[in-house]
Amino acid sequence: MATTSTPRDAAEVTRAIAAGPTRTIETEAAALATWTFGQGPDLVLIHGWPLHAATFRHLVPALARAFTCHLIDLPGAGQSGRLRGGGPNKLRRAAAAVGEVVDALGLTRFGVYAHDSGAVVARLAAAAAGDRVDALVLGNTEIPGHRPWQVRAMCALAALPGGGRLLLESLRLTLVRRSPMTLGACFRDPAYGDGEFYELFIAPLLRSRALAAGQLDLLHDFDWALIDALEDVHRQLRAPVRMIWGDGDPYFPLAKARAMVEQFAGEASLSIIPGARLFAHEDAADEVLAVAIPFLEENMSRETAA
């Protein structure tokens, strides 16, 4: 498979993503933008909300030295098309779309790195892919039976006329942006969300109503029943799982993450990043990589390496 060169640093990844996708793949749910970096066994990276593929900019330079990294903008995010149709099954449809992308890319075996709601999509897609999946790395993400009050509040606000726009517009304010209700819950230092992160992920939503609508789709008719039933999905996952958890995350508490380890059908373990929060891969990237790379190297097949 043709790939881009291995990027030297996060800035090079960011520029490559901004320049446009390596390939756009039409799926039943939406047209999905994809990027490919590096060489080696195939690794699919799936972002959370309200992010896009550039959230992996700090991970890709190191990962691409050992793996062929496939980044995907989920439906409604970044440079992908908006999810076609409404209804409460958006995460399931996104997972089906990821499966179509994996097939279109010709990946016979692959690993997965995902976080937040992207790790819900990843678990569903991995369950459907079965033995093709060699390993899963899951960052802080949804837990069966756990409904974070912050997410419930955002869903309630988004359901009001103009509420979703109000939610996004409020992020212009430093005080709101740094609060534990919003981006302050995502990083060790709440100010992390003020700089590059803001320009990459928040400012575009404030400039473009179309981009904002695509991201806000997830909050409308959020599928809590699916989250509650994730334990059944975990019982289908036989590939090794490594959960990498920021222990300061107020959305998905460590105690409940520990209990989730026992739900997976295959070997599963939990690594803790002290002080990190929801988006540990952003501001604790080196600590995340120190766990993820050895785990992936140990478990991923090299039979189909480029």
Image (cartoon, rainbow, N blue to C red):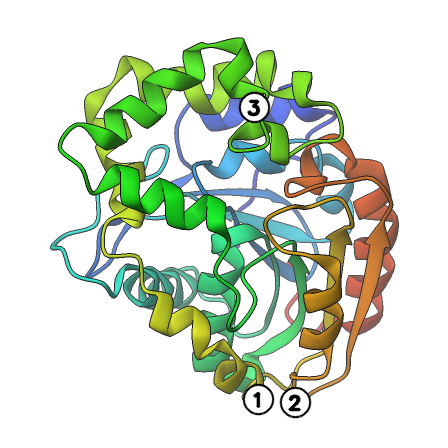
Image spot of residue 204 (x, y percent) = 36, 18
Among numbered discs 1 and 2, the one appearing first in the sequence: 1
How crowded pointer 2 is (Cα within 10 Å; few <14, some 14-19, many 20+) is rated as: some
Which residue was labeled with disc 2? 265
Quadrant (top left/top right/bottom left/bottom right) for the C terminus: bottom right
Q: Quadrant of residue 93?
A: bottom left
Image spot of residue 246 (x, y percent) = 75, 48
**Residue type highlighted by circle 1:** Arg
Among numbered discs 3 and 2, the one appearing first in the sequence: 3
How crowded pointer 3 is (Cα within 10 Å; few <14, some 14-19, many 20+) is rated as: some
- The residue positioned 32% from the left and 68% from the top of the image is 92
> Distance of mark 1 from mark 2, alpha carbons?
5 Å
- Element carrying mark 2: loop
Which residue was labeled with disc 1? 235
- The residue positioned 51% from the left and 74% from the top of the image is 126
> Distance of mark 1 from mark 3, alpha carbons?
36 Å
> Looking at the image, can residue 14 be seen?
yes
**Residue type highlighted by circle 3:** Thr
> Looking at the image, can residue 24 be seen?
no
Mark 1 in CB contact with mark 3 (< 8 angstroms): no
Among numbered discs 1 and 3, the one appearing first in the sequence: 3
- The residue positioned 53% from the left and 73% from the top of the image is 144
Is the residue 170 above or below the residue 299 in the image? Answer: above
How crowded pointer 1 is (Cα within 10 Å; few <14, some 14-19, many 20+) is rated as: some
- Element carrying mark 1: loop
Q: Nearer the viewer, mark 1 or mark 3?
A: 1
Task: Tell me the tag on residue 14.
Answer: 3
Mark 1 in CB contact with mark 2 (< 8 angstroms): yes
**Residue type highlighted by circle 2:** Ala
Give the left or right position of residue 195, taking residue 25 as reference.
right
Is the residue 138 above or below the residue 231 in the image? Answer: above
